[in-house]
Image (tube, rainbow, N blue to C red):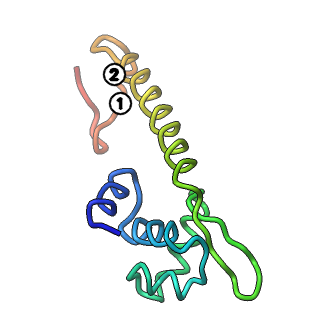
């Protein structure tokens, strides 16, 4: 796992710990939380919270059993999901920005840090 990979994953919305865990899981395929923590260099007290958060985001799957195992979503699937989410956000943002104009009521009623914008 390289620093550049971790930085790139963070640019895509991963936290530092999530980036380390995901990169480690790509190598490990599936593993126990303790093994992931060791491989990723994430403190053991933080590993379960990180893995559960990643599961909610769709980055990791939990395999219930004794012991509980974790595996990552395949990189190709992850990249397609991130791309689709980004394109949707970009489209929605462009649409909202285009609907704003200095003369519209939308523009004048928006607030910035709690202050009314005056035009």
Position of 75 with respect to 106 (left or right) is right
Residue furthest toward the right? 65
Q: Quadrant of the C terminus?
A: top left
Image x and y of residue 82, in percent: 49, 44
Image x and y of residue 7, in percent: 29, 59
The residue lying at 61 percent from left, 69 percent from top is: 71
Image x and y of residue 96, in percent: 42, 24
Mark 1 lies on residue: 110
The residue lying at 38 percent from left, 50 percent from top is: 12
Q: Quadrant of the N terminus?
A: bottom left
- The one nearer the camera, 118 or 54, is 54
Real-space Cα distance between discs 1 and 2?
A: 6 Å
> Does the residue at mark 1 contact the one at mark 2 (Cβ under 8 Å)?
yes
Using the image, determine if residue 65 lies above or below residue 116.
Answer: below
Secondary structure under tag 1 reads loop
Mark 2 lies on residue: 107
The residue lying at 65 percent from left, 65 percent from top is: 61
The disc label shown at residue 94, or none? none
């Amino acid at each position: 796992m390289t620093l550049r990979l971790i930085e790139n994953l963070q640019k895509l919305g991963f936290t530092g710990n999530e980036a380390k865990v995901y990169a480690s899981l790509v190598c490990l395929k599936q593993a126990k939380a303790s093994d992931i923590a060791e491989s990723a260099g994430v403190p053991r007290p933080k590993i379960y919270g990180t893995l559960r958060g990643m599961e909610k985001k769709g980055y990791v799957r939990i395999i219930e059993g004794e012991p509980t195992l974790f595996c990552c979503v395949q990189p190709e699937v992850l990249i397609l999901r991130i791309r689709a989410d980004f394109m949707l956000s970009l489209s929605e943002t462009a649409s909202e920005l285009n609907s704003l104009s200095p003369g519209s009521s939308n523009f004048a009623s928006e607030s910035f840090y709690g202050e009314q914008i005056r035009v």
